[in-house]
Image (tube, grey):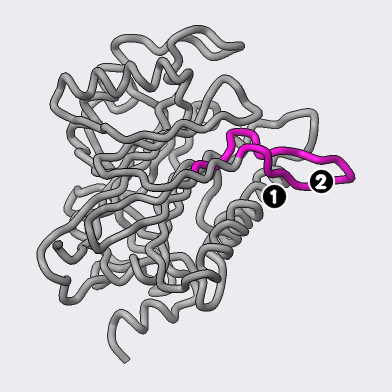
Amino acid sequence: MSVLLRLLAVAWPILSAAAVEQPPAAGSFSIASYNLENYCDRPTGTRPVKSEVSKSKIREALVKLDADILAVQEMGSLEALEELRTSLRTEGLDYPHWEFVNGVDTNIHVAILSRFPITARRAHTNDGFLLNGRRFRISRGIAEVDIRVSRDYRLTLLAAHLKSRREVPEADQAELRKQEAVLLRRFVDERLDADPDTHLAVVGDFNDVRNSSPIKILLGRGTHTLFDTRPTERSGDSANNLNPRLPPRDVAWTHYYATEETYSRIDYILVSRSMAQTLDRSGTSVLAFQDWGLASDHRPILARFFRKTD
């Protein structure tokens, strides 16, 4: 059995450095995700206006990242998104194609920016679930787009921002997040049922850790399993865990929670089998940059994939 097949068979699907043994013909593209921490152009409830210092640091990070496709969370208004696109364009990073999703939460949103054409849009904003006899709608909606990366390569991207770990009076925050994950997974299964070989990426701030119910639900099982690209810092660390069934001991955290003073990985880029087979591990990372906390309480993540050229 090849290294790749052994990787695909393990119980917890995390891709190792050997994910691509021999890449396809030259050509690649990248997908990134970044929670911008209240990128608001006007005060909304308890969320302040994003400062110019923070905006500048975010632009610095995004220019360094140089992603082809970027999913962002906690985007404020549509005008705030346009301001970000315009500001990035002046710094040489142009995203002519975009998607912006409204949800129950009218303060912060999910958005997608792309260098490549978006050929179809399926925003999920009215979908919901029953919990304890009460119906809930997914708070920030789910963005779903089809993107034409090249003449011969199509990609479906689902971007989400699941319920935070902040307690709310309506229901248990963990159960709300779990049900949102079930809903998101339903869309994954629908796409993979239609075409098991489709190029599918599920990205965003899922607000939970690797061994939690929501992440296990999103990863799934069997032929429709999604694979965790697990971006890490490019710090030179490469030591394996003493337990071979656990991830390596490199630096993968994406979020700082000040109340508990904890660092955890709650942002993900999960991909279908067809995309996992072309992951460029050397081009997959958590962006570590100076004064990252001026930009956001999250750090951006990026995964690169090989593709055939036109």
Comparing 203 with 257, the one in front is 203
Mark 1 residue element: helix
Q: Position of residue 59 (x, y in %)?
A: 25, 24
Give the labeled residue for mark 1: 179
Where is the N terminus found, in terms of image quarters? bottom left
Comparing 129 with 233, the one in front is 129
Q: Are marks 1 and 2 in contact (CB under 8 Å)?
A: yes
Identity of the residue drawn at 67% across and 38% down: 126
Left or right of 138: which side holds 196?
left
Give the labeled residue for mark 2: 131
53 drawn magenta: no
Q: Mark 1 or mark 2, which has the lower sequence index?
A: 2
Q: Which amino acid does label 1 sit on?
A: Gln
Q: Position of residue 72 (x, y in %)?
A: 40, 34
Left or right of 299: which side holds 30?
left
Where is the C terminus found, in terms of image quarters? bottom left
Q: How far apart are marks 1 and 2 (CA)?
A: 8 Å
Please identify the quarter of the rendering in which residue 153 is found: bottom left
Answer whether residue 117 is visible to the viewer in this image: yes
Mark 2 residue element: strand
Q: What residue type is labelled 2?
A: Leu
Identity of the residue drawn at 72% across and 46% down: 175
140 drawn magenta: yes
Mark 2 is surrounded, within 10 Å at the Cα level, by few (under 14), some (14 to 19) or many (20 or more) other residues, namely few
Comparing 168 with 134, the one in front is 134
Would you place residue 180 above or below residue 305 in this image?
above
Q: Position of residue 68 (x, y in %)?
A: 24, 43
Residue that sits furthest to the left in the current view:
26
Would you place residue 147 above or below residue 66 in this image?
below
Q: What stretch is highlighted in magenta?
A: 125-143
Please identify the quarter of the rendering in which residue 253 is found: top left
